[in-house]
Image (spheres, grey):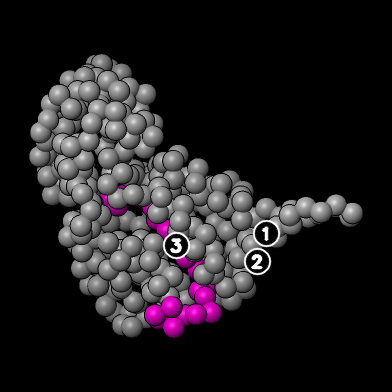
Amino acid sequence: MSHLPVLLTEVLAALMSTDHLPERVIDGTLGAGGHTGALLQTGVQQVMGFDLDPQALTLARANLAIYGDRASIVHASYAEMRLYVAQQGWSDGVDGILLDLGVSSMQLDTAERGFAFMKDGPLDMRFDPTGIRASAADLVNHADADELADLFYEYGEERESRRLARAVVTGRPYATTRQLAEVLEKVMPRRHGVKAPHPATRVFQALRIAVNDELRIIKTVLPDAITLLRPGGRLAVISFHSLEDRIVKQTFKDAALEISSPPGMVLTEKRAVVRLITRKPIEATAAEIAQNPRSRSAKLRVVEKI
């Protein structure tokens, strides 16, 4: 199966439209290497790509082999990019950073990874199934109803969180995605002819975010990424749901905010460290959505280091 990088043209335009061709770029979410390959093909000298997923890394190594040592592939979270940048000898920073947040099409399409409720597989959801994090099955089988309800509400924005959490606890134990999805659908059956998300949609999103600690990592990494940029370097972030986009939008807004003290007044001054390249997020074109329906919810925001 071909795995299409989302907003590829827009990402290239965002990262390449500086006064000079970027020398060093970090792809924090390497996947199969689609974005990285395009950057190298366009003339970027070196790309360091991060991913937690061993299957994705195997594909990326094969896809990027033609670029030799111009592509550095790291089996680690993008949360560790500062450490690896220092080890690489890039102490003076990088010219571009890309983060394509959330779960990949490849992960959703692989039943064994446990991300998708439409495919039956082990209830896992870890980006790195070889790691030490607890799986989604561990979470739903051991958390109490209040903990699950809070999780479904906070990370899935699920209004029926308490009702669903009680049903999940009653239906335990779970080993597969289908077992959990069936319990959720019994609680909130879909009405015939009504277009609405599957009742498992928000719960599965919430579990995935919790299992991988996604939102905390995003909040931590964005300031780090801005710090790593050289002046004129750009940070491009693709998000897929409102929780991610809200964090990206607010972080970028805060980093671009400048506060000056009026004459004669003593206030805390703050200098902007970036300028906003995108006032509003860039979204996929109709043509891309037709080719890759999952791009429909993608939003790209970009800032440039001052």
Q: Residue 298 in the image: x percent, y percent?
A: 42, 46
Query: Which callout, 1 or 3, points at the residue further toward the start of the chain?
Result: 3
**Residue annotated with mark 3:** 98
Q: Is residue 151 above or below residue 114?
A: above
Left or right: residue 255 versus residue 42 is right
State the extent of the magenta-drawn residues as a range: 86-105
Magenta span has 41? no
For the point 61% across and 71% down, the residue is 231
Mark 1–mark 3 Cα distance, whole angstroms, equals 21 Å
Q: Give 199 or 213, whichever is nearer the viewer.
A: 213
- The answer to whether one can see residue 292 in this image is no
Residues at discs 1 and 2 in contact (Cβ within 8 Å): yes
- The quarter of the rendered structure image containing the N terminus is bottom left
Q: Compared to 299, does 168 lie above or below?
A: above
Q: Amino acid at mark 3?
A: Leu
Give the quadrant of the C terminus.
bottom right
Q: Residue furthest right?
A: 264
Among the 4 quarters of the image, the one containing residue 138: top left
From the viewer's side, name the closer residue of 233 and 194.
Answer: 233
Q: Could you say which is closer to the camera, residue 157 or residue 277?
A: 157
Three-letter code for the amino acid on which mark 1 is drawn: Ala
Label 1 belongs to which residue? 272
- From the viewer's perspective, is residue 181 above or below residue 137? above
Q: Secondary structure at mark 3?
A: strand
Q: Is residue 166 left or right of residue 261?
A: left
Residue wearing tag 2:
306
Mark 2: give few (<14), some (14-19) or many (20+) Cα within 10 Å.
Answer: some
Q: CA distance from mark 1 to mark 2?
A: 8 Å
Image point 19% across, 23% down: which residue? 167
Q: Earlier in the sequence, mark 1 or mark 2?
A: 1
